Image (tube, rainbow, N blue to C red):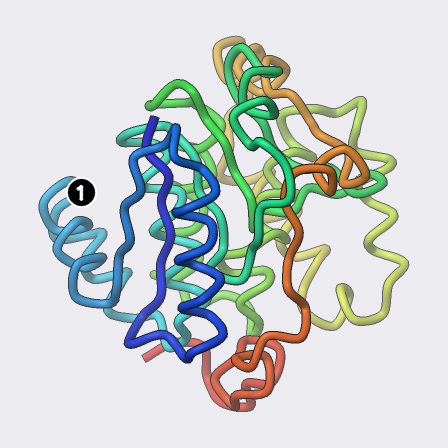
């Protein structure tokens, strides 16, 4: 199984250390690191001109990471972790607990910073890719969180898992999420995503891993230097599209 990471340019020292550490600490996986150029080349080779045009419109490195991870999971399956993760347990043991796919679950929320898929071509991932591309082409939202990130994934969940929707919709009580376009994102997913039987069944085959359980294996280094950069998605003041 492949383990993918992305950093758009030469990583700062602390991030490079994190990336080297996870490569060392998970020898069971074939480690593959992408940057801006190699990521774009992958998109062009596997998804063609429309996807490259979407890639080229993304202003922020985090948005390219969001897009690339979905495409990699669709093409190869495997494991994706953000560059600021560290492994503190045997991640292969975590992977082995899910027959098809895993995504982390915090309370009632999915977080797409960590994705594991045994199987490529997963219908849920493809639904997320479709919505992401449509969001970018129509320049929806002013925040990467909704346009390409966890807001998008949770919006797709609302469509394919109506029983989970009431809990997911509690995000709407958070002023920040509302300001970023949460309700519009859910409405967009309802318009774009057709929850046929294959998609619904595929989603319900995903193992949702509580963060307390995930934390036994991998942790995000929240004090990483890049979080202070002006192009960190939460700090960004300009348009998220080029």
Q: Is residue 48 left or right of residue 30?
A: left
Q: Quadrant for the N terminus, please.
A: top left
Residue 93, horizontal then vertical, whole percent: 58, 22
Residue 109 in which image quadrant: top right
The residue under the point 12% across, 51% down is 44
The residue under the point 36% across, 28% down is 77
The residue under the point 34% across, 23% down is 120
Residue 103, horizontal then vertical, whole percent: 61, 33
Q: Is residue 84 above or below residue 171?
A: below
Q: Is residue 3 left or right of residue 147?
A: left
Residue 189, horizontal then vertical, whole percent: 57, 42
Residue 52 in which image quadrant: bottom left
Q: Residues within 10 Å of mark 1 (few under 14, many from 20)?
A: few
Q: Secondary structure at mark 1?
A: helix
Q: How many marks?
A: 1
Q: Is residue 148 above or below residue 199?
A: below
Q: Is residue 106 left or right of residue 182?
A: right
**Nearest the camera: 171 or 29?**
29
The residue under the point 65% across, 38% down is 217
**Nearest the camera: 18 or 108?**
18
Q: Quadrant for the C terminus, please.
A: bottom left
Residue under circle 1?
Answer: 47
Residue 114, horizontal then vertical, whole percent: 55, 44
Q: Is residue 102 above or below residue 218?
A: above
**Nearest the camera: 121 or 217?**
217
Q: Is residue 225 above or below residue 125?
A: below
């Amino acid at each position: 199984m492949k383990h993918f990471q992305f950093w758009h340019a030469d990583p700062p020292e602390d991030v490079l250390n994190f990336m080297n550490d996870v490569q060392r600490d998970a020898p069971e996986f074939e480690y593959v690191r992408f940057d801006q150029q190699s990521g774009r080349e992958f998109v062009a080779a596997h998804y063609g001109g429309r996807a490259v045009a979407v890639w080229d419109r993304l202003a922020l490195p985090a948005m390219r990471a969001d897009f690339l991870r979905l495409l990699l999971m669709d093409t190869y399956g495997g494991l994706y972790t953000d560059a600021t993760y560290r492994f503190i347990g045997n991640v292969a043991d975590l992977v082995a607990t899910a027959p098809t796919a895993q995504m982390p679950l915090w309370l009632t929320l999915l977080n797409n910073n960590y994705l594991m898929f045994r199987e490529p071509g997963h219908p849920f991932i493809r639904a997320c890719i479709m919505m992401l591309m449509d969001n970018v082409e129509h320049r929806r939202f002013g925040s990467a969180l909704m346009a390409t990130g966890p807001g998008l994934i949770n919006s797709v969940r609302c469509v394919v898992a109506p029983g989970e929707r009431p809990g997911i919709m509690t995000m709407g009580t958070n002023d920040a999420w509302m300001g970023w376009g949460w309700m519009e994102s859910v409405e967009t997913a309802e318009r774009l995503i057709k929850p046929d039987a294959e998609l619904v069944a595929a989603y319900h085959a995903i193992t949702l891993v509580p963060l307390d359980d995930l934390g036994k294996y991998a942790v995000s280094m929240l004090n990483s230097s890049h979080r202070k950069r002006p192009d960190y998605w939460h700090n960004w003041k300009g348009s998220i599209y080029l």
